[in-house]
Amino acid sequence: MYSLTPNSEELYKLIDTRMPFGKYAGIALIDLPEEYLVWFESKGFPEGAIGGLLAQVYEIKINGLEFLFGPLRKNRP
């Protein structure tokens, strides 16, 4: 069943996971520029877990929800 309540562990993955390749290698996924994610969306996200995470960041950014990450960064366990 789908939950509308964000899972904080899933959101932390977007803060903690670093881009493993390309121009922005080493940058936290949530910090990738929106234009870069739009490019991936048009070309196709990579397969596997990283592609899924990039698709999530894309949706967050195009919907203007990055502000949700401010409190998570401050309260990181």
Image (tube, rainbow, N blue to C red):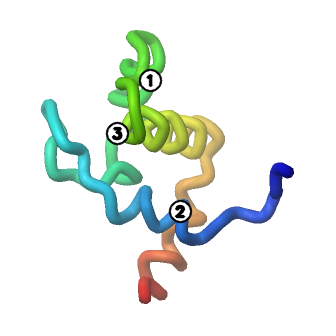
Mark 3: give few (<14), some (14-19) or many (20+) Cα within 10 Å: few
Residue contact between numbered discs 1 and 3, judged by CB atoms under 8 Å: no
- Residue displayed at 43% across by 56% down: 14
Q: Which disc number belongs to residue 11?
A: 2
Label 1: which residue? 38
Q: Quadrant of the C terminus?
A: bottom left
- Residue displayed at 46% across by 67% down: 12
Mark 1: give few (<14), some (14-19) or many (20+) Cα within 10 Å: some
Label 3: which residue? 33
Q: Secondary structure at mark 3?
A: loop
State which quadrant residue 32 falls in.
top left
* Horizontal side of residue 9 vs 40, given as left or right: right
Is 57 rendered above or below residue 73? above
Extreme residue in the top direction: 43
Query: Which of pointers 1 and 3 lies earlier in the amino acid sequence?
Result: 3
Query: Which of pointers 2 and 1 lies earlier in the amino acid sequence?
Result: 2
* Horizontal side of residue 32 vs 27, given as left or right: right
Residue 51 image point, x, y percent: 41, 33
